[in-house]
C-alpha cells in the first residue's frame, strides 16, 4: 500500500508540474505578466484602465483581493477571476492576496493617460509553491 501511495504522489507531482508549466508560459517569473498596454479612449482624459485576471497554479480563477499599493483602490475579483480599476494615470504596483497563499506584488508599472493595461497574476496554491 505504501508503494502505491508513493507512486500516486509521484504521478500527481508530475502532472502538477506539467500543468503549471503550461499555465505559467505567459507569466513573467511564473507570477505575473503585462499582456498589453494599448490606447483606450473609453476612459476619460487623465485616467487609465488597469485590468486582468487572478489565477491559481492550474490557471483557474481564484477568489482573491486585488489592490493598488499606496492608494485606496481595492476590490475582490469576480467569479472569473477578473478585476478592473479606472484610476488617475501614474505609476502603480498591483497586489493580489488570497488566504493560504503568499501575496503577490508587481514591480512598478507606468500607466499612461487613456491607456489600457492588462496584467494577469498567478497566486501559488500548491504545496510545491511553499
Image (cartoon, helix red, strand yellow):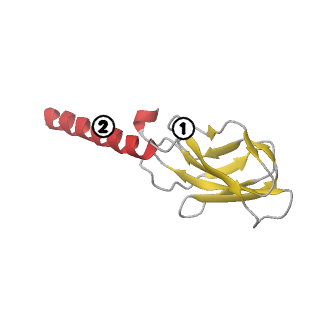
Q: Is residue 35 left or right of residue 47?
A: left
- Where residue 51 appears, as percent x and y from the top left, is 65, 56
As displayed, is residue 125 above or below residue 62?
above
Give the residue pinned by disc 2: 13
Is residue 60 shown to the viewer in this render?
yes
Question: Quadrant of residue 114 in the image?
Answer: bottom right
The answer to which of 74 and 108 lies nearer the viewer is: 108
Mark 1 or 2, which is nearer the eye? 1
Give the residue pinned by disc 1: 28
Q: Residues within 10 Å of mark 2 (few under 14, many from 20)?
A: some
Q: Residues within 10 Å of mark 1 (few under 14, many from 20)?
A: few
Q: Is residue 69 left or right of residue 24?
A: right
Q: Is residue 24 left or right of residue 83?
A: left
Q: Is residue 22 left or right of residue 76?
A: left
Label located before the other in sequence (1 or 2):
2
Q: Secondary structure at mark 2?
A: helix
Give me the residue at 29% from left, 42% from top: 15
The answer to which of 60 and 126 lies nearer the viewer is: 60
Q: CA distance from mark 1 to mark 2?
A: 22 Å
Seen as rendered, the residue at the extreme right is 46
Seen as rendered, the residue at the extreme bottom is 42
Q: Secondary structure at mark 1?
A: loop
- Where residue 47 appears, as percent x and y from the top left, is 82, 57
Give me the residue at 78% from left, 64% from top: 43
Quadrant of the frame with the N terminus: top left
Question: Quadrant of residue 2 in the image?
Answer: top left
Q: Are marks 1 and 2 in contact (CB under 8 Å)?
A: no
- Where residue 83 appears, as percent x and y from the top left, is 64, 58
Is residue 117 shown to the viewer in this render?
no
Amino acid at each position: 500500500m505504501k508503494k502505491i501511495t508513493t507512486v500516486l504522489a509521484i504521478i500527481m507531482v508530475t502532472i502538477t508540474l506539467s500543468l503549471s508549466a503550461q499555465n505559467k508560459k505567459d507569466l513573467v517569473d511564473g507570477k505575473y505578466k503585462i499582456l498589453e498596454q494599448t490606447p483606450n479612449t473609453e476612459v476619460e482624459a487623465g485616467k487609465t484602465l488597469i485590468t486582468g485576471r487572478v489565477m491559481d497554479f492550474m490557471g483557474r480563477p481564484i477568489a482573491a483581493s486585488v489592490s493598488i499599493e499606496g492608494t485606496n483602490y481595492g476590490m475582490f475579483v469576480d467569479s472569473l477571476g477578473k478585476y478592473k480599476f479606472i484610476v488617475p494615470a501614474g505609476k502603480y504596483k498591483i497586489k493580489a492576496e488570497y488566504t493560504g497563499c503568499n501575496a503577490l506584488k508587481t514591480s512598478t508599472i507606468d500607466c499612461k493617460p487613456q491607456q489600457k493595461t492588462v496584467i494577469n497574476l498567478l497566486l501559488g496554491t500548491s504545496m510545491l509553491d511553499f
